[in-house]
């Protein structure tokens, strides 16, 4: 425990402090970094979160389980589906409901589509952070087909709230499979373009290789999960190690890099997009027919006790912990969101580097601020 | 009067004679200065605004977008509308800012770029002043702009602006060396610092062709260094959007912001024009010795079009840089200059001196 707290920051009155945020183009939301600078070099960083705290966990206590789903969209809005899934799985496990195979397949497909869309947006924003402005439009262009698939099936593009305890709200659109197949074909062709535009660029490589090295020990002790953790060799893919939904039926590899630098985190995400395409390809043709939901009671009451379910969102491990006293509302709900843990490594990674590196490193951690504050 | 678009000398002498015959020499001089000033202000505004438009179109081309296309045909009036918007915006004054320097800074930046266009030869006989130390003058004047940037950063009383200004200072001071040395290589070739003489010396071939390998090296160095000197991407550290929000002009609003904005584009035009003049033959048409038919066709294109065409080509390359490359970090930027460009440049100068001494270039 001692070594974890070794990097406690000691503020001095004559430090040159600069506030990066709450409104700043590269904090990706209302996050504030309190930077202490020595010229261009960052001495220490104190992240201040809470600017977009909405008390979702407290709100959950006043709502039924069906209603909670709609709140969970709002923390990591880029992996809305996975957030929904965590609550649904927790409730289903508590009630010991076995959902139909079709639901499992659709949920997994949606999770992977959502992951690709999220990584695309991350790629856009990461390029912007480094000053390569064209990436933004390339990424958004390719994200559009995914959002179209979502829109066609659930009528909403970002926060779909399509899951409900016991299955899905309704069945997917008849075009669902065809459109996904089209997308896989399209994106397989277009993904190498990402490498041509950014990955191979010498300036980009110099900016990212060897910058902000996160050791495996730190990743584990700070709980940095997702592609950021896997870039440091931390085997933390929940899909692989604790399979849920249809992940046990597909063959995919866990992307692992051992360098732990910004470039490794970047590569981990790019490779994850390829891997997600593989998963989609395996699932989309084998979608079984059947019901899209099981019959549930209109008012769900979980038996007294506590329930935990974790899923892999695009940014890492999301834990959903529900304590029930047998009522229609949960007694307590706690979400272990990936970004909260991923954020606080920033001082360790970026202090001692330049301001520009801080931007690159925070970009490579792929922070979504509402997910930090909840 | 005989007006000839291939040689403006007769036109300018006609104007001069007409003026001196109707008024005293002192007044004629004054009127001439006024005419040149008005022409340059108009030229400055048009070029500045349409470079903004061009950049938006080029950027749209690279980014799979359409760019401005609503105001006027093909969006041609968009930047003019933007200018009027900026003119009408409120000028925000910052508490504890140094008001005098804060107001002065945009003017220094814009005056520096104004002074530089005076020496550019746009066509044969079409330049405001043909100094015998033209390159030296351009070099001196174009580095004045950084004073404005430093003042803007310092007087704004903002930490982001200050960091941007310091970065800009370090950057411009370093890259000026490379710009100067790259231009010096052609001065060695042509044996003159007068821009008109340099252009005339390229009548039988542009220096980038005549000077072969060392001239190409200088051209590339000039392209990189001048992009850095004008604070454009991938060297736009002074206004790095993702780090410093807008760098030195974070606190400026309205027309003062527009001054910085226009000056940035004019500086780009100026360095592109210098590169076109010095390396690509200025207003000289493209000639291949022996092919008289083609050379005649080339001669029919007016010199002004040649000059602007070459400038536009270099501007396009600079825009292409900006929209495809990520930004460098400050230490990498300085390392690039002091560790790679400057030694390469010095060696290149020695090489060129040797080549000129031995006469190993196309005469």
Image: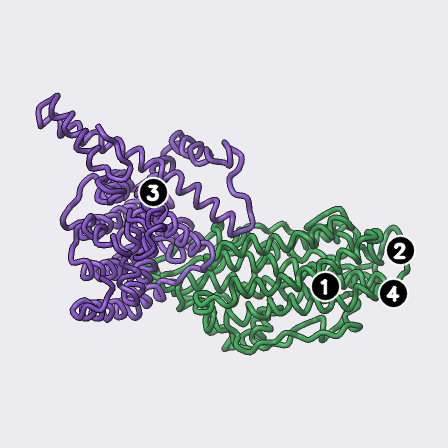
Chain colours: A green, B purple
Q: In front: B336, or A344? A: B336
Label 2, secondary structure: give it: loop
Q: Earlier in the sequence, mark 2 or mark 1?
A: 2
Q: Nearer the viewer, mark 2 or mark 3?
A: 3
Question: Disc 3 designates what residue?
Answer: B300
Q: Earlier in the sequence, mark 1 or mark 4?
A: 4
Q: Chain of mark 2?
A: A
Asked if the residue at tag 3 contacts the one at tag 2, i.e. Cβ–Cβ closer than 8 Å, the answer is no
Q: Nearer the viewer, mark 1 or mark 4?
A: 4
The total number of labels drawn is: 4
Question: Disc 1 designates what residue?
Answer: A321
Q: What residue appears at the point 39 percent right and 42 percent down from the top-left corner?
A: B51
Q: CA distance from mark 3 to mark 4?
A: 83 Å
Q: Quadrant of residue A1?
A: bottom right
Residue A277 pos. (x, y %): 70, 66
For the residues beneath circles 2 and 1, the answer to whether they share a chain is yes
Q: CA distance from mark 2 to mark 3?
A: 84 Å
Q: In front: B45, or A1? A: B45
Is residue B149 found left or right of A303 in the rendered image?
Answer: left
Q: Nearer the viewer, mark 2 or mark 1?
A: 2
Compared to B202, does B55 lie above or below?
above
Whether residue A333 is visible to the viewer of this picture, yes or no, is no
Neighbor class of circle 2 (other Cα within 10 Å; few <14, some 14-19, many 20+) is few
Label 4, secondary structure: give it: loop
Q: What residue appears at the point 80 percent right and 53 percent down from the top-left corner?
A: A175
Compared to A213, does B55 lie above or below?
above
Question: Disc 2 designates what residue?
Answer: A296
Is residue B239 found left or right of B59 in the rendered image?
Answer: left
Q: Which mark is residue A98?
A: 4
Q: Chain of mark 3?
A: B
Residue B346 pos. (x, y %): 22, 68
């Amino acid at each position: 425990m001692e070594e974890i707290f070794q990097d406690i920051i000691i503020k001095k009155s004559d430090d040159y402090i600069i506030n990066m945020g709450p409104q700043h183009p590269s904090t990706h939301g209302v996050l504030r970094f309190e930077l202490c600078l020595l010229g261009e070099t960052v001495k220490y960083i104190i992240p201040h979160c809470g600017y977009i705290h909405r008390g979702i966990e407290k709100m959950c206590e006043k709502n039924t389980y069906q209603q909670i789903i709609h709140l969970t969209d709002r923390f990591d809005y880029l992996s809305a589906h996975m957030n929904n899934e965590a609550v649904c799985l927790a409730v289903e496990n508590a009630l010991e409901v076995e959902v139909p195979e079709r639901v499992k397949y659709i949920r997994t497909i949606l999770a992977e589509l959502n992951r690709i869309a999220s990584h695309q947006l991350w790629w856009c924003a990461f390029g912007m952070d480094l000053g390569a402005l064209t990436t933004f439009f390339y990424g958004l262009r390719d994200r559009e087909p995914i959002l179209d698939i979502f829109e066609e099936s659930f009528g909403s593009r970002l926060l779909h709230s399509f899951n409900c305890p016991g299955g899905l709200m309704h069945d997917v659109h008849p075009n669902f499979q065809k459109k996904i197949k089209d997308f896989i074909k399209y994106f397989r062709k277009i993904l190498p373009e990402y490498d041509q535009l950014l990955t191979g660029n010498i300036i980009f490589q110099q900016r990212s290789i060897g910058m902000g090295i996160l050791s495996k020990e730190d990743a584990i002790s700070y709980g940095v999960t997702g592609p950021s953790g896997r870039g440091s060799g931390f085997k933390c893919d929940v899909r692989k190690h604790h399979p849920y939904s249809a992940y046990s039926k597909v063959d995919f590899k866990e992307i692992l890099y051992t360098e732990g630098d910004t470039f490794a985190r970047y590569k981990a995400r790019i490779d994850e997009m390829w891997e997600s395409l593989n998963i989609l390809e395996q699932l989309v043709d084998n979608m079984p027919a059947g019901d899209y939901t099981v019959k549930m009671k209109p008012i769900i009451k979980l038996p007294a006790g506590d329930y935990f379910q974790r899923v892999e969102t695009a940014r890492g491990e999301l834990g959903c912990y529900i304590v029930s006293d047998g009522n229609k509302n949960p007694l307590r709900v706690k979400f272990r969101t990936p970004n909260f843990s991923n954020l606080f490594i920033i001082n360790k990674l970026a202090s001692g580097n330049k301001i520009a590196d801080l931007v690159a490193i925070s970009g490579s951690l792929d922070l979504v601020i509402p997910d930090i504050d909840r | 009067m005989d007006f000839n678009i291939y040689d403006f000398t007769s036109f300018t002498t006609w104007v001069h004679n007409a003026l001196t015959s109707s008024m005293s020499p002192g007044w004629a001089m004054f009127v001439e200065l006024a005419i040149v000033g008005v022409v340059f202000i108009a030229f400055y505004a048009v070029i500045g605004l349409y470079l903004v438009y061009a950049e938006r179109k080029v950027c749209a081309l690279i980014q799979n977008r359409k760019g401005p296309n609503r105001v006027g045909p093909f969006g041609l009036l968009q930047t003019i509308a933007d200018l009027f918007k900026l003119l009408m915006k409120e000028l925000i004054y910052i508490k504890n800012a140094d008001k005098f320097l804060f107001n002065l800074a945009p003017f220094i930046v814009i005056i520096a770029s104004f002074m530089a266009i005076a020496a550019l030869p746009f066509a044969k006989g079409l330049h405001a002043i043909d100094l015998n130390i033209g390159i030296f003058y351009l070099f001196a004047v174009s580095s004045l702009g950084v004073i404005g940037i430093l003042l803007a950063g310092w007087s704004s009383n903002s930490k982001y602006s200050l960091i941007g200004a310091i970065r800009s200072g370090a950057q411009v001071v370093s890259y000026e060396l490379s710009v100067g040395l790259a231009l010096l290589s052609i001065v060695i070739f042509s044996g003159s610092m007068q821009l008109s003489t340099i252009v005339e010396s390229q009548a039988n071939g542009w220096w980038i062709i005549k000077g072969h390998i060392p001239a190409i090296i200088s051209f590339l160095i000039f392209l990189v260094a001048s992009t850095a000197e004008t604070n454009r991407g991938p060297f736009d550290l002074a206004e790095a959007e993702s780090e410093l929000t807008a760098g030195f002009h974070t606190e400026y609003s309205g027309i003062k912001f527009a001054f910085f904005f226009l000056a940035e584009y004019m500086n780009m035009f100026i360095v592109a024009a210098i590169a076109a003049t010095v390396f690509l033959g200025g207003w000289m048409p493209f000639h291949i010795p022996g092919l008289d038919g083609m050379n005649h066709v080339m001669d029919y294109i007016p010199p002004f079009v040649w000059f602007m065409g070459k400038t536009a080509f270099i501007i396009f390359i600079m825009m292409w840089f900006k929209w495809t490359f990520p930004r460098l970090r400050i230490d990498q930027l300085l390392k690039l200059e002091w560790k790679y460009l400057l030694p390469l440049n010095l060696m290149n100068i020695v090489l060129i001196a040797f080549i000129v001494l031995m006469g190993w270039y196309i005469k």
